[in-house]
Image: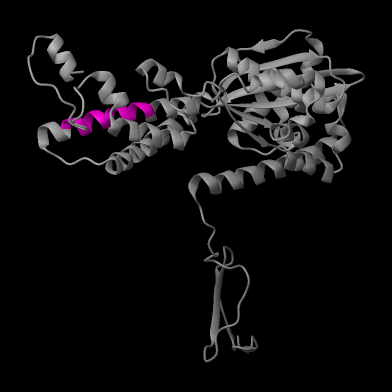
Amino acid sequence: MPTDENLMKRGCISVSACDLCLAHSETTPHLFLTCCFAQQLWMWLGSLLNINFDCSTLSNLFMSLDASWSTFLNNIALAVVLHVIHSIWLARNGVRFNNAKITAHAAKMKILTLIKHSAQLAAVVSTAAEKQVNTDSSVTDGSAASGGMFRDYMANFRGAFAQKISGHSVLHSELTALILAMEIAHSRQWNFIWLESDSLNALQAFDNITIVPWDLRNRWSNCFMLGLTLKWSHICREGNACADKLANIGHFHTRTRWWESLPSMLHDDFLSDRLGIPQYPARECWMAAGLSQLLENLAYQDGTVADRVFGMCRNEDNAMLWRVGRMVFAIWNEWFTVHQLRRQNFVPVEDLMPVRWENPRVGWIKCNVDAAFVASPILLLWVFVFATPMGNLWLA
């Protein structure tokens, strides 16, 4: 940077003076750190960020940032510091080359504008880099397991995990699933994570650590020191089918099982999530049709949807299959109608060809006309029917 100090080191002889304070020769430490103009900006920025900036050296200045902040906040803070340094340099050039009058207030307003743009850009970048993970747990017969699935902002599969764990309560298992998700995200350098769980009690731990059991509290606290930018939300159990199946699989894996590609047993549920097909209306339709015992039959729980349907065809009688076919068609027809409306932005309009006869308006006589043709013998017949506004027959 061509400050007077650096220009003199390159052999340029000139009288050096800081253009912003006129009280000191221009050196890099003075211009950006100790000048009264720079000091006003650093004190102002420190009050905004609740930081006491160490302005003894540039390296100490950057080390003043809070290391416990998330990656997102640290990136924003770093951008703010660079904006201040850049604004000081622009103010110096404005005074020296354009004889401009630069005030600290004008510099602050410019920095605030730059901060806003940086935050917006960082938000866009973080959204593209964000990974969503759905977690769930399974506790049965004294055994507990957890599982979860990672997806990116385009709903693409990015990985899944399942593991048998030591906890025997639902809350303990749900929290363990969330902890595993955060630890895995950190190990894979996924710093922007959206956690989604069907346990409201577990999600309350983000606001109240006393909910966390004592044997998990240390791991839970450590997750917030990993530099992750987190957000969390609740999802109904019916919408968490993929994580639910992974948690059930976890009973068979004493160590963390990781999938880089989508497991075959999740294809149907994953596709349903990606297409936005809700899980719970279909289940309710089966129950309403009196087919819940068929849906829950253990013989039809494995394989794809096609495998299950073919299994029913082999084992059930014709009457049962007819009921299943009618119900499946009703579900498909409802799904197809809804998605046609969504994709085509179609708005239903009134039928221009009504099938119900309507009375004419007052002062009008309505005439309905039709004709009939008979091939042999050749006959042509016209029929005219006249009606009054009250719907009474007037002439035929």
Please say whether residue 380 is visible from this viewpoint. Answer: no
Return the residue found at the far top. Answer: 255
Please say whether residue 275 is visible from this viewpoint. Answer: yes
- The residue closer to the viewer here, 156 or 385, is 156
Return the residue found at the far front. Answer: 23
User: How many numbered markers are drawn?
Assistant: 0
- Indicate the position of residue 200 as horizontal and vertical percent values: 75, 37
Which residue shows up at 72% across the image and 33% down it?
203
Q: Which residues are magenta?
A: 81-93
91 falls in the magenta region: yes
Which residue shows up at 76% across the image and 42% down it?
327
312 falls in the magenta region: no
Return the residue found at the far left. Answer: 13
Quadrant of image for the N terminus = top left
- The residue closer to the viewer here, 167 or 380, is 167
167 in relation to 294, above or below: above
- For the stretch drawn in magenta, the main secondary structure is helix
- Indicate the position of residue 388 as horizontal and vertical percent values: 59, 89
- The residue closer to the viewer here, 163 or 272, is 163
Question: Seen in the image, is 380 located left or right of residue 14?
Answer: right
Quadrant of image for the C terminus = bottom right
- Indicate the position of residue 55 as horizontal and vertical percent values: 38, 23
Tell me the quarter of the picture where residue 165 sits: top right
Tell me the quarter of the picture where residue 95 sits: top left
- Identify the coloring: one colour
- Indicate the position of residue 297 as horizontal and vertical percent values: 87, 28
Tell me the quarter of the picture where residue 8 sits: top left
Question: Seen in the image, is 37 located left or right of residue 194?
Answer: left
Question: Seen in the image, is 80 located left or right of residue 159?
Answer: left
Which residue shows up at 86% across the image and 25% down it?
169
Which residue shows up at 39% across the image and 37% down it?
44
